[in-house]
Amino acid sequence: MDDDLLGVLIKGPTGTAKSVLVRSFADMLPNKKIVNIPQNVTDEQLFGGLDIEDAIKYGKATIKGGILQRADGNTLYLDNVNLFDPKMLNSILECVESGKVIVEREGVSSEYSLRTTVIATMDPAEQMLPDGIADRFNICAQSYSADNESDRNQIIISNLEFEADPGGFAERYSKEDSEMLQCIEDAKRTLKDVEITRADLNKISKVCIDLDVKGHRADISVARVSKALASLDGRTAVSDADIKDAAILCLLHRRGDVIEEKDVTQPQTDESPPDEKEREMVISLRKEDAVEEYAEGTEDVSPEIISEESPEAGEGLGTVGEITNSVKERLENMDSIEAIRLHKIVGKAGRRKSIEVSKRTGRYRGFKIPNGRSVDPAFDATVRAAAPYQRTRENKGLSINIEPQDIREKIRLKKDSCSFLFAVDVSGSLVKSGMMLDIKNGVKAMLMDSYVQRDKVALLTFRTGEVRLSVPFTRSVEGICDILENTVTGDGTPLGPALMLIRGYMINYVRKNPEERCFVILITDGEATYPVMRGRDATMELKKVVAIMKVPNTEWIVVDSSLIPGKINHALNLSKMLGGRYIRLEDLQSV
C-alpha cells in the first residue's frame, strides 16, 4: 500500500510456510515479479559487472546490471536473510533505500535505478540477524507452528488438495484473492488522505521511548504503518488501535537482547515512590512544558496535549500507558518460548565473523590480484579483466587470449567457528540449595540451542573425588544431555582441580585448532572446598591456580549458580580473577 515501506521481515521456525507466503504475494502484486537472491551470489552477479560480450566483440568496457537491476519495479526476495554476509546485506539495503545502484568495475562506473520492496524470511533458531540490519526492515511479522490438532489436520488436507489439483485449489480461493486485491487498491487511493496528528506522533514517540527502542527508524516506521492500517480500514484518521498494531509490527525485531549485568556488590533496594508534593511538582512542570510548546505556534498540536500527563485527563497518560503496556504484552506473548541462547551469554564477542581462508574451501565471495602463482583462479573475473583487450591481442586460435596480468584469484570466506566447554559444578551444596535441577535444565537448553549445533561443545563435571571430562569436543549434543541428566551429584567442590584439568585440555585443543574461538562456561557458586594438593586451604590455593589460567584464544564466563550470594560473592570474585564475564543463573532464565 505504502511504497515508502521498503522492507518486510518474516521470522518463524522452519516449515511454517514463510516461503510459500512470499510466493503467494505474486498474485497480490499485479505486474510485479518476485526476484530471488540466492545464497551463493557474488558481487558481480548481484550488483553488476563488465559486459563480457561487448568487451570481446567491440573492445568496449560497459557495465551490465545484475540481479538488482532485474528487481527494479519488482519485489526482491531474500530467503534465510540471516545467513547472508552482513556487508552484502548492508549494501543491498542501502541501494534499496537510496533507490539506485552504483557499480564500479575494472575502472568503469555505472549507475541504475532500483525501486523495489525487500521481503526477507529467516528462522531465528539458525542465527540472529545483526541489529543494524534488522533495523532497516520497516515491518517484522512472526509465524508459528500450529499447536492444536485441528489446525495441523487442516494444513495437511490443504497441502494434499493443492498437490492433487493446483488449478482447482487456486480457483476455490480466487474470489477471496480478488476481494483482498481490491481492498489493497482502495487503500492505496485512501492513503494520501490519511492524516496523522501531532498527538498521534507524541504517542508513537512515547511508546518507542518506553520500550527502549534505539534510533529513529522505528518511530518513522510506526507512523507510516499506522497510516497504512487506517487506509486499509477505509479511514482517513489514525486511531490508537492503528498505533498499537503498527508498533507490534515495527518493534518486534527492534528490541535489544543483551543480558544486563547487575551490580550485585550493591544491595538491591526497591525505589520508593515519590511523595505527593514531588509528584505534583513533576506534573506541574510537564504541564508547563506542554503549554509552552503549544504556545510556540505548532499548528497541528491539539490542546489535548496540555493535559496529556495530567491524572485528570481521560485520554492522556492513561492512553499512552495503555498502548505501551498492550504493545509490550503482545510482543512478549509473540516471542516463542526459546531456549537460553548461547550467543546471548557470550554477547557481542559471540557474533560470527567471516574470515578469509587460503585453502580451496569456503564460499567464493570476490577476487583479487594474486601475489605470485594462483592456486585458485577466478575464471569469471579473469575473463572480464582480459575481455577489453581482445581486439588488440593476437588470438592465436583461441576464443579469448588471457595474459598473466589478467589472472585473478578467488577470495573465499567462511564463518568462523566456536567451541564451548561447559564446566558444571555438581557438588552437594548445589543439591542442597535446590539449584541443581535449574542448572541441568539451563545447560541442556543451551546445548540444544541451534547456535551451538553448528559448533563444537564439550562437557566437564566436577565434585569431590571426581573431576571428569565427560564428553570431549563434539558437534553431537544429544548424548551430552543424557550424560548430564544421569550425572551423580553431591560432596564437596574441587574447583581448583577442575580448573587445572580445563587448562590442560584447552591449551592442547587450542594448539591443534588455532582458528577456533573458544569459550569456557563455568557454572558454579564459586566456593572451593577441596584443594588440588591435600592439606592446603582450598580458597587460598584457588588464587594461585587462577593466576596460571591464561589459555590462548579463550574467554571465560562464570554463571553464578548460588541461590542467594552471601556476604562474599565467590562466583563474582572468581569471574574477576579469570578476567571473564559474570552472569547470574536467574538472569539466564529471564532471557
Image (cartoon, rainbow, N blue to C red):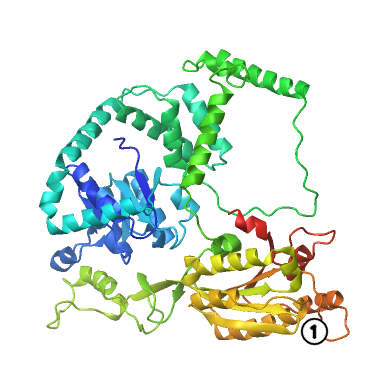
Amino acid residing under circle 1: Val
Residue neighbourhood size for the residue with mark 1, other residues' Cα within 10 Å, grouped as few (<14), some (14–19), many (≥20): some
The quadrant in which the C terminus is found is: bottom right
Q: Is residue 138 above or below residue 127?
A: above
Q: Image quadrant of residue 42?
A: bottom left
Q: Is residue 110 above or below residue 191?
A: below
What residue would you read off at disc 1? 532
Residue 463 or residue 198, whichever sits in front: 463
Q: Position of residue 328 (x, y in %)?
A: 53, 40
Q: Position of residue 361 (x, y in %)?
A: 39, 79
Judged from the image, the secondary structure of the residue bearing numbered disc 1 is loop
Q: Position of residue 521 (x, y in %)?
A: 64, 70
Q: Image quadrant of residue 145?
A: bottom left
Residue 118 or residue 428, whichever sits in front: 428
Q: Image quadrant of residue 46?
A: bottom left
The residue depicted at 60 percent of the width and 19 percent of the height is 290
Residue 68 or residue 168, whichever sits in front: 168
Q: Is residue 256 above or below residue 525?
A: above
The quadrant in which the N terminus is found is: top left
Count of numbered labels shown in the rendering:
1
The residue depicted at 17 percent of the width and 55 percent of the height is 162
Q: Position of residue 202 (x, y in %)?
A: 52, 27
The residue depicted at 21 percent of the width and 36 percent of the height is 181
Q: Is residue 430 above or below residue 538?
A: above
Observer able to see residue 83: yes
